[in-house]
Each structure stands twice: as structure tokens, then as C-alpha cells.
């Protein structure tokens, strides 16, 4: 191993005594740049959503983002080993928060999802996705191939996944519950759990789907029905999907021009500043604009996977995998929903949609991701000894 | 360390697989975007345009109706109406309550609003109140925060500045009924009106215009965000009538509380200068909807305010028929200017006695004197000598008992009986019927317009056709410039009759002497008429009882026809005052006032009022196309 200067980024990082400056420089600034770029796209979209005004969406959102950017950088410099130690307390706190929401939560759109924490409203289910990834990473950080092939070893992890998923389902928030389960499954898969077990579980869910359907909330059933046939009630539940598709389709290749999307400016887009924010970009910037945003998102996911792959320790790998997958699932569900590929599910487009809770959760996750990146080559005590 | 590396490779492999799966999903999303944004772009772009741009037809502005000088008889006025968009109101019931507290809305209307709100989707506005006054407007304006979803919008309503005074000739408009709206989609437009009577009906196609359109961008609630394009359409043509508003007002005012009609014609062109019928009605009420109480009062009124008596009221002409009888007899050769008949005060036919108006008799008189003093016996004899068919033929030539061909709807044809008519209607025509035909009683029924037409024809010797429309869109109508063909009535005969009519008005013995013009160098010729509307008993006839003692509806109708100036006829008039007793008593003064006004202001043949010094009896300028 060649000797590097103390500030060299290639110098192995095994000791936290190297100081904050070193950590700061080890942050993946390309990723941070992408995050800022995405937030900029969000600002532009929200500015347009308000008819060409920073009020009431864009300004508040960018201020929140700036605050969370600082938080993200701070978290990035917290030692990943400390974060790993906090995994289980965070998980337990998350589950408790979900229980609190069930008891005292603020009901919105037929579901109890929100906790009012004074200035910010918090959606514990958003945080839970991060905490679940952390907890599973902590569980599997020293797992051997034999252990991951052992059903008795994996079963507790499944329970760890199912507890928050069940609570989120109970809220009820089908979209987030499915995403949470998918994150858990991905982390398990990354940890080496056998893939055919997942195939079996998916098959069981598919078979029992009709039974589950009967237990869905009325609005959830309505979403599924209107998804299957959006034209049935053009001004009712299917209206959102139709208007959304019109907005996307009318964009064409170069779009109708910034602030000139008729669907957006004339309020045909429902919830346009939140879940359907992508339609603004697609309508006003066209296929070119939406593909650019899509590329940016995919590049960020790729960077997260890069962080996972280049990490020396299993905890960091799995957490980064979970966070990257979370970003992917956000994009997938939101975009598919907007394009009418899957039922509408109240899932925002991260950093672009208006709303504090998702932004907070996503930025916390990115902070942990960067902590992994910064501390990618730290030694977990006892890790290499087995 | 090997184990670590192996483990790392295994994780990298798995992560790469997961990443690849996610990349595939992103590829699918990109493909879907391509499908939506590129492949199906035109389809969705069209949907977006339809979504946001809504085109709606708008009612064109209806053409104005003016008098010959441009005085507006039917105009358009903007009014304000309140609409309610349920979709924009979080609590519609509360908004309605607030609205009702501010603006007076009848309980019937409230029921209608509730039905409309229940029946329409939330994004279709419901009319809350039409014709908002300034107080309503101010109240709504001030309370806007309490009235989410309430929209104040402008509409056009038809106004009639002269109100009831010109209601009959001008007519009125109303909302098209459902059948009409179904037959012509243009009529289904909100704000569209259809003419119901008078010129509004006759010239409806001209006045209506061609609808325009407004393209508006609407948001999801259907609320108009901005106007993209506006085509006002083609407004209806303005129609200028031959009427002179001053004469029209004078006619109505002269009739005062009487029930009756006045028609004044330009004797040369046939243009109707005044066409009054009383009592009248407020034509503006139809635009908003006539209140039930008002409608019922019109329907039950024995004076029938909705009937245009000037063109559709049928009256026995009485003695005003005598000039026609004289002309018929002279043409038939049964009468000459020198023929003398003796009037003993009555004519005995078989056992029946036909009294003269003057029971003491007029003595031996010629036709001029007979007209002057309105001797009935003279004309009984003339009628007996001539027979009804020649009399009817001359009457028809004078425009009596035939289609007046006037450009107004519902003009009556009237009746001058012939033998053929009697046969057709299985009427046993007796000689007595012929006798009373000589004095315009019996079966004969005519409209005031026909009497005025007859007067114009006798005055000019031409086959003048009455018409009311003078200009359409500024273009002088052919009827106003036509040189009417000759009547083919012997000039000598006409001169004899005109002399009789001159003496009626201008000699102290004449029945119309009181109505003579008090203007220098200009005389009027005319004829009084007093037409019974009941069959008096022979005893009453003999006793020459006072008609004024009868109940109003039993009294005779008073008539007067006249033309002036005598030596250069320009104005012809017919006045009927129902149950006004003697023509000289109630009808002639109206003709006097009208004729005096007409001669002083000389509206005939002009589009601009007379401004220079008064020029009485100057030959009127020929009708030109200016």
C-alpha cells in the first residue's frame, strides 16, 4: 500500500481521529450535486404549479430542503458504526411512532398517517423504511452464507419486516406498506437470502390476493377499480389518471413550454404539487425534460448502488442497498402511478413533490447513505475475525 | 481476507442483479413515457385542448328597431345576472342562505334553484337571479367572501323605450320554446330571443343575426380563466320603420283611455306613420317572463290589450264605407254626380223601416251632399240600385275585405260580402242586407288599417299598399320607393267623392266640421262613421234614442277617416274609437290632432326631422332612395 498524504482520498480510513475535514471531503459530492439538481427541478415544478410564483409551494420547499441538506451533511459525517449501533433503537422508535400514529394520528385522506410535531408534520411510515433497512443491515452484518440459507436465522428478519408492514397497512397506506416490504425483501436478498424463498412468498401473496382485496379500504378498492378502467367515471376517481395522462401526452417531445402547460396552469392536474408533480415537468418540458429527470434519478440510484458495492462492510452495503432501493421504489411507484401503470398510491416523487415528511425521510436516508460512503472502509470490530 | 473478498463478490453480484432489475423497470417507464408523449402525443394534445379550451356560441346582438328618424323603439340593454357554481362552494347550502338573505328571491324560484342544483353536475352554473338591480349588485359585491361560487355575469335584454305605446307595431320577443329550440339549435343559445308579434316577428330573421363564438380557457371547475378568442358574430340588421315616434305617441295619447285604433299612412308611399291600438301592454315583460297575475288580467280584459286592433280588430265601417259605395255605384252607372235621391228620414222596404240618422230627413240631395251630411237613405237607395257584388268589387279594389299584404303578422282580411260568399256560408241574403251594406253595416267587417288604405287610395287614385318597414340595414325597401299603379277608377268619380269628403270637414253642415284643420292654406277631407254594434229594436230606432244611455259595450263604434292636404294628398288616417258613439264626437278630434301634427312636422318621405320653417301644403318631395 502506497503512502498517501493525510488528506488523500485514497488513504484508508480506519480511524475517526482523522477529523471532520477529511470526512467532509470524502462525501460523494457528485451525489450531493445530483440531490441539489433534483431539488432544483422540484423548485421549478412547484414554481410552475403555483402559476409562476414561489408561493405557496416552491419557496417553503426549498427552505426545507436547504435545512435538510445541512442535516444530511452532518449525518454523513457521523461514524457509520455509531449509526449501526443506533439501528435497533431507531427501529423500535419507528414502530412505537407507528403505534402512536394509530392512536393519536392526524387523519388525512381516509388514513391516519401523520404526527403533528409542532412545525413539521411527520409521517413515521416514511422514516420506518430507513429504520427497517438499518435494522436488517444490523441483523445481517455478520451473517454467514450458512446463516442466510437457514430458515430459522432468516425468520426473525421476516418478522422484523412484517411488524412495520402490518402497522402501515393498518393505517391504512397500501402503497407505503408494499414499498416497505419490498425494501425489506431487497435487503434480505442483498444479504444472501435464497431468491426462491421470495418466489414462494410472492406466489402465496398472488394466490391470496382476492382474499386480501376484500379487506381493503373502500378508497383503496376504488383506486384499483379505476386503475383497471379509468374511463368509467371521467369526473370521479378515474379523473386523476385521465387528466394526468393527458398532461403527459400533451407535452410531446419538447413540451408546451415552462409555465405554459395548459393542464397544469388551468388546474386540470389533481394534487399536482404533490403526487402528480411529474406531470408538470412532462407537460411543460416534454419527453426531453421527463427523460432528463428520469436519467438523473437513475443516476442517483446507480450512485447509491455504487456506494453499496464499494463499501467494505456488510452493514454499509445493506443499508446503502436499502436506501438506493427506497429511492428506486419511490420513483417507480410514483411514475407508474402518474402514467397509469399501477393504482394511484399517495407516493410522492422524492425531492420534487411538495411536502415535508417525504423530504425529511429521504434526506435522512441520503445522510446515512453518505455516511456509508464516507465510512466505506472502516473496520467493524470483530467483523473480519470470524 | 479471501472470505471477505468472496463475500464481497457475492454481494456485488446480487446488487448488480437487483440494479439490473431496477434498470429494466426504468427502461419500461421510459418506454411508457415514449408511448404517451411521442407516439400518442397528438391524441393527448387534442384532449388537452378540448379540456382547456371550450368554444361556445354566443347569441348575436339583436338588431334595433327604430322609427324613421332613428328613435329607438326596440333596443338592447345589458343586464346582470347571478349564477351559482356548486363545485366552487365548500358549503352550497350556506352560500344559498347567504344569497337569499341579500337578494330577494321568490319561493318559486328557490324551488327551481334547488331542482337545478340537484339535477345539474356541480360545474354547470345554475341561474340564481336574472336582472339584478344595483342594490343586489352592491350587496353581492360587498359580501363576495360569503358567497363562494356565486358569479355575476352580463347578459342582454330587449328593451322597448316607448313601452306600451309602440307595443303593437313593434311587437315583442320572448325566450324560444322548447320546440323552437329543438328545431333550430341557434335558438337554444342562452340569451337568444324570438320575435312573437309585430315587426319583431315579421323581421325576426333579419333582426336575429348570426351567432358568434367565444373560446375560453376553463379550469377543472369549468371556471373561465381567460378568453382566447372572441367572435361577436354578425349582429342583426337594424330595421327602421316608417313610423314617426311623435305621431305614434300622439295617437296613443289622443286615444287616451278609449279602446280603439289609429292608423296613419303616407298616402303616397303607403308607409305606416302611426299604428296605435289601445289598451296596450308592456312588451318588455315578455323578455323576463310575464307575471301570472298580469297575464291573467290581459286574458280576462274585455278590451283585449294583446289584440292589435289596428290590423286585426274587425269593425263595421259604418258611414266610412259610403265613399266606396258611391264609387261602386258610379262605376256601375247607377249613380252620377247629378243623381238626386229624396230622403224622408227613412226607407220602407216591405214591412221594415230603415231609419236615416236624421229622422227628419235630408230632402232631395245629390251624392256630394249625401256624403257631407252622411245621409243613410241616399245610400240605402244607391245600394239597392247597385247590388252587393259591384259594391264588394269596388271595396276589394280599395283594399277592403282582402289581404292587406302588410308586412306585419296576423293582419286580418276582414269581409265585404258577395253573393258567392253568402252562398258558401249558406246565408239567405235578403234585400235588407243589401240596404244596410250601403251604410257599412251588416256583414261588413274591416280593420282600421284597411280603412286607412282605402282613404289613401281614394286620395291618390293609386293602389297604395300599406307597409311598415322602411329600411333594413339602412337600405330603403322597395315598397317605399314603388310608384303604386293606378286604381283604374274614373278620375271624375274620384273627384266627386273627394268633393263630398271635403265638404264633410270644411262646411258647417258637414258631419266632421268640428275637426277641420285650423292651419292656413291646407284642408283635410274626411268621413265620419258611427257603426252600431247591436241590433236596436225598431221602437228604439223610431224614437231615435240617445246612444249614450246604453251600457259602454252596447254603444256604437265611432269612426273617422281622412286625408290631407286636400289638393295634394300626403297623409291618410283611420280612427276607430270603440263604443265612442258618433264618429264626429270621439274619432274626428283624434284625426284632427294627428293630421295637424303630421302637416306641421311633415315626416312623410323623410329620414331626418323637419328643421326649417314650417311649409304648409308644399308638395311633398318625391320619395327617393336616400
Image (spheres, grey):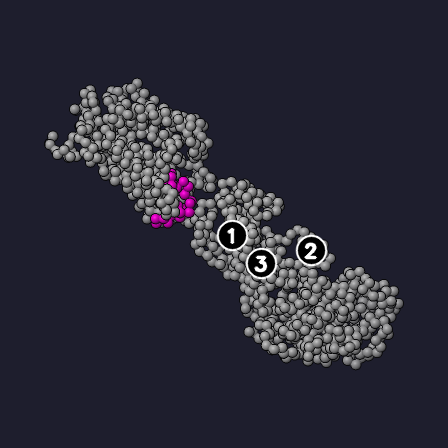
Residue A184, percent from left and from top:
32, 27
Q: Label 3 is found on which chain of the structure?
A: B
**Could you tell whether B589 is left or right of B210 in the image?**
right
Give the residue drawn at x 76%, y 63%.
B579
Front disc: 1 or 3 = 1
Q: For label 3, count other residues whose C-alpha is less than 10 Å away and answer few (under 14), some (14-19) or many (20+).
A: many
Tag 2, which secondary structure? helix
Tag 1, which secondary structure? strand
Residue A131, percent from left and from top:
31, 28
- Which quadrant of the view contains residue A247? top left
Give the residue drawn at x 37%, y 49%.
A260
Quarter of the image with the C terminus of chain A in it: top left
Q: Which residues are magenta?
A: A257-282
Please state which of residues B346 and B20 is positioned toward the viewer in this rendering.
Answer: B346
Give the residue drawn at x 31%, y 43%.
A41
- Circle nearer the N terminus (1, 2): 1
Give the residue drawn at x 39%, y 34%.
A345
Residue identified by numbered label 2: B298
Q: Label 2 is found on which chain of the structure?
A: B
Disc count in the image? Answer: 3
Calculate the distance from the C-alpha at mark 1 to the C-alpha at mark 3.
17 Å
Circle 1/circle 2 CB separation < 8 Å = no
Residue identified by numbered label 3: B158
Calculate the distance from the C-alpha at mark 3 to the C-alpha at mark 2.
21 Å
Q: Is residue A259 magenta?
A: yes
Tag 3, which secondary structure? strand
Amino acid at each position: 500500500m502506497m503512502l498517501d498524504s493525510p488528506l488523500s482520498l485514497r488513504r484508508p480510513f480506519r480511524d475517526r481521529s482523522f477529523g471532520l475535514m477529511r470526512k467532509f471531503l470524502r462525501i460523494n459530492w457528485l451525489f450531493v450535486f445530483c440531490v441539489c439538481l433534483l431539488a432544483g427541478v422540484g423548485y421549478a415544478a412547484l414554481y410552475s404549479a403555483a402559476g409562476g410564483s414561489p408561493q405557496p409551494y416552491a419557496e417553503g420547499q426549498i427552505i426545507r430542503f436547504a435545512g435538510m441538506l445541512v442535516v444530511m451533511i452532518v449525518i454523513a459525517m457521523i461514524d457509520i458504526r455509531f449509526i449501526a449501533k443506533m439501528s435497533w433503537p431507531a427501529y423500535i422508535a419507528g414502530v412505537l411512532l407507528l403505534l402512536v400514529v394509530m392512536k393519536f394520528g392526524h387523519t388525512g385522506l381516509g388514513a391516519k398517517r401523520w404526527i403533528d410535531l409542532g412545525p413539521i408534520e411527520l409521517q413515521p411510515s416514511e422514516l420506518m423504511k430507513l429504520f427497517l433497512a438499518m435494522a436488517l443491515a444490523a441483523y445481517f452484518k455478520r451473517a454467514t452464507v450458512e446463516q442466510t440459507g437457514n430458515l430459522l436465522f432468516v425468520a426473525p428478519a421476516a418478522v422484523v419486516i412484517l411488524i412495520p408492514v402490518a402497522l402501515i397497512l393498518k393505517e391504512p397506506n397500501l402503497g407505503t406498506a408494499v414499498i416497505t416490504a419490498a425494501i425489506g425483501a431487497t435487503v434480505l436478498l442483498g444479504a444472501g437470502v435464497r431468491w426462491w424463498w421470495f418466489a414462494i412468498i410472492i406466489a402465496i401473496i398472488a394466490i391470496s390476493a382476492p382474499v386480501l382485496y376484500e379487506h381493503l379500504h373502500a378508497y383503496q378498492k376504488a383506486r384499483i377499480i379505476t386503475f383497471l378502467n379509468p374511463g368509467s367515471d371521467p369526473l370521479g376517481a378515474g379523473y386523476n389518471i385521465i387528466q394526468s395522462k393527458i398532461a403527459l401526452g400533451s407535452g410531446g417531445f419538447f413540451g408546451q413550454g415552462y409555465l405554459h402547460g395548459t393542464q397544469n396552469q388551468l388546474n386540470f392536474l389533481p394534487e399536482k404539487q404533490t403526487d402528480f408533480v411529474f406531470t408538470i415537468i412532462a407537460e411543460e418540458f416534454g419527453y426531453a425534460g421527463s427523460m432528463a429527470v428520469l436519467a438523473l434519478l437513475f443516476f442517483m440510484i446507480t450512485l447509491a448502488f455504487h456506494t453499496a458495492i464499494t463499501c467494505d462492510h456488510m452493514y454499509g452495503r445493506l443499508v446503502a442497498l436499502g436506501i438506493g432501493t427506497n429511492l428506486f421504489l419511490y420513483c417507480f411507484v410514483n411514475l407508474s402511478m402518474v402514467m397509469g401503470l399501477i393504482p394511484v398510491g399517495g407516493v410522492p416523487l422524492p425531492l420534487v413533490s411538495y411536502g415535508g415528511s417525504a423530504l425529511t425521510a429521504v434526506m435522512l436516508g441520503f445522510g446515512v447513505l453518505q455516511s456509508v460512503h464516507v465510512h466505506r472502509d472502516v473496520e467493524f470490530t470483530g467483523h473480519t475475525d470470524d | 481476507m479471501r472470505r471477505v473478498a468472496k463475500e464481497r463478490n457475492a454481494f456485488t453480484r446480487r446488487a448488480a442483479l437487483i440494479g439490473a432489475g431496477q434498470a429494466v423497470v426504468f427502461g419500461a417507464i421510459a418506454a411508457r413515457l415514449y408511448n404517451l408523449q411521442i407516439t400518442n402525443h397528438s391524441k393527448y394534445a387534442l384532449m388537452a385542448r378540448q379540456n382547456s379550451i371550450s368554444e361556445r356560441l354566443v347569441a348575436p346582438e339583436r338588431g334595433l328597431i327604430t322609427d324613421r328618424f332613428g328613435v329607438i323603439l326596440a333596443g338592447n340593454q345589458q343586464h346582470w345576472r347571478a349564477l351559482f357554481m356548486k363545485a366552487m362552494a365548500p358549503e352550497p347550502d350556506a352560500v344559498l342562505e347567504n344569497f337569499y338573505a341579500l337578494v330577494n328571491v321568490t319561493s318559486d324560484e328557490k324551488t327551481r334553484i334547488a331542482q337545478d342544483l340537484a339535477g345539474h353536475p356541480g360545474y354547470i352554473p345554475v341561474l340564481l337571479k336574472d336582472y339584478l338591480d344595483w342594490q343586489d349588485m352592491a350587496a353581492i359585491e360587498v359580501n363576495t367572501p360569503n358567497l363562494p361560487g356565486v358569479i355575476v355575469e352580463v347578459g342582454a335584454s330587449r328593451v322597448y323605450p316607448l313601452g306600451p305605446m309602440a307595443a303593437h307595431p313593434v311587437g315583442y320577443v320572448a325566450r324560444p320554446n322548447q320546440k323552437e329550440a329543438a328545431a333550430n339549435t341557434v335558438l337554444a343559445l342562452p340569451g337568444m330571443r324570438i320575435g312573437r308579434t309585430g315587426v319583431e316577428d315579421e323581421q325576426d330573421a333579419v333582426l336575429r343575426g348570426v351567432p358568434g363564438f367565444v373560446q375560453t380557457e376553463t379550469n377543472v371547475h369549468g371556471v373561465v380563466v381567460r378568453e382566447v378568442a372572441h367572435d361577436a358574430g354578425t349582429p342583426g340588421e337594424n330595421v327602421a320603420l316608417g313610423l314617426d315616434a311623435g305621431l305614434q305617441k300622439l295617437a296613443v295619447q289622443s286615444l287616451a283611455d278609449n279602446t280603439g285604433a289609429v292608423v296613419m299612412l303616407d298616402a303616397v308611399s303607403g308607409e305606416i306613420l302611426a299604428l296605435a291600438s289601445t289598451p296596450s301592454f308592456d312588451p318588455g315583460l315578455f323578455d323576463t317572463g310575464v307575471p301570472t297575475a298580469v297575464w291573467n288580467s290581459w286574458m280576462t280584459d274585455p278590451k283585449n290589450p294583446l289584440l292589435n286592433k289596428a290590423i286585426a280588430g274587425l269593425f263595421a265601417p259604418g258611414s266610412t264605407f259610403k265613399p266606396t259605395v258611391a264609387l261602386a255605384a258610379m262605376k256601375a252607372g247607377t249613380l252620377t254626380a247629378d243623381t238626386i235621391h229624396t230622403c224622408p228620414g227613412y226607407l220602407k222596404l216591405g214591412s221594415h223601416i230603415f231609419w236615416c240618422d236624421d229622422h227628419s230627413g235630408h230632402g232631395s240631395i245629390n251624392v256630394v251632399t249625401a256624403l257631407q251630411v252622411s245621409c243613410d237613405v241616399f245610400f240605402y237607395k244607391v245600394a239597392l240600385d247597385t247590388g252587393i257584388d259591384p259594391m264588394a268589387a269596388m271595396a276589394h279594389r280599395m283594399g277592403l275585405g282582402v289581404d292587406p299584404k302588410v308586412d306585419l303578422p296576423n293582419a286580418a282580411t276582414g269581409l265585404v260580402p258577395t253573393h258567392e260568399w253568402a252562398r258558401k256560408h249558406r246565408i239567405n241574403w235578403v234585400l235588407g242586407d243589401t240596404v244596410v251594406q250601403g251604410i257599412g253595416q251588416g256583414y261588413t267587417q274591416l280593420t282600421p288599417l284597411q280603412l286607412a288604405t282605402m282613404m289613401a287610395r281614394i286620395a291618390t287614385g293609386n293602389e297604395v299598399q300599406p307597409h311598415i318597414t322602411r329600411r333594413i340595414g339602412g337600405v330603403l325597401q322597395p315598397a317605399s320607393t314603388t310608384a303604386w299603379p293606378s286604381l283604374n277608377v274614373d278620375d271624375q268619380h274620384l273627384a266627386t267623392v273627394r268633393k263630398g269628403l271635403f265638404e264633410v270637414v270644411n262646411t258647417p253642415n258637414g258631419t266632421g266640421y268640428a275637426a277641420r284643420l285650423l292651419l292656413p292654406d291646407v284642408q283635410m277631407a274626411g268621413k265620419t262613421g258611427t257603426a252600431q254594434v247591436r241590433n236596436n229594436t225598431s221602437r228604439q230606432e223610431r224614437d231615435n234614442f240617445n246612444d249614450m244611455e246604453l251600457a259602454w259595450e252596447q254603444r256604437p263604434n265611432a269612426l273617422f277617416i281622412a286625408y290631407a292636404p286636400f289638393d295634394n294628398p300626403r297623409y291618410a288616417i283611420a280612427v276607430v274609437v270603440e263604443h265612442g258613439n258618433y264618429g264626429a264626437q270621439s274619432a274626428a278630434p283624434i284625426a284632427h290632432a294627428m293630421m295637424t301634427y303630421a302637416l306641421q312636422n311633415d315626416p312623410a318621405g323623410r329620414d331626418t326631422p323637419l328643421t326649417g320653417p314650417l311649409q304648409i301644403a308644399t308638395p311633398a318631395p318625391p320619395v327617393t332612395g336616400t
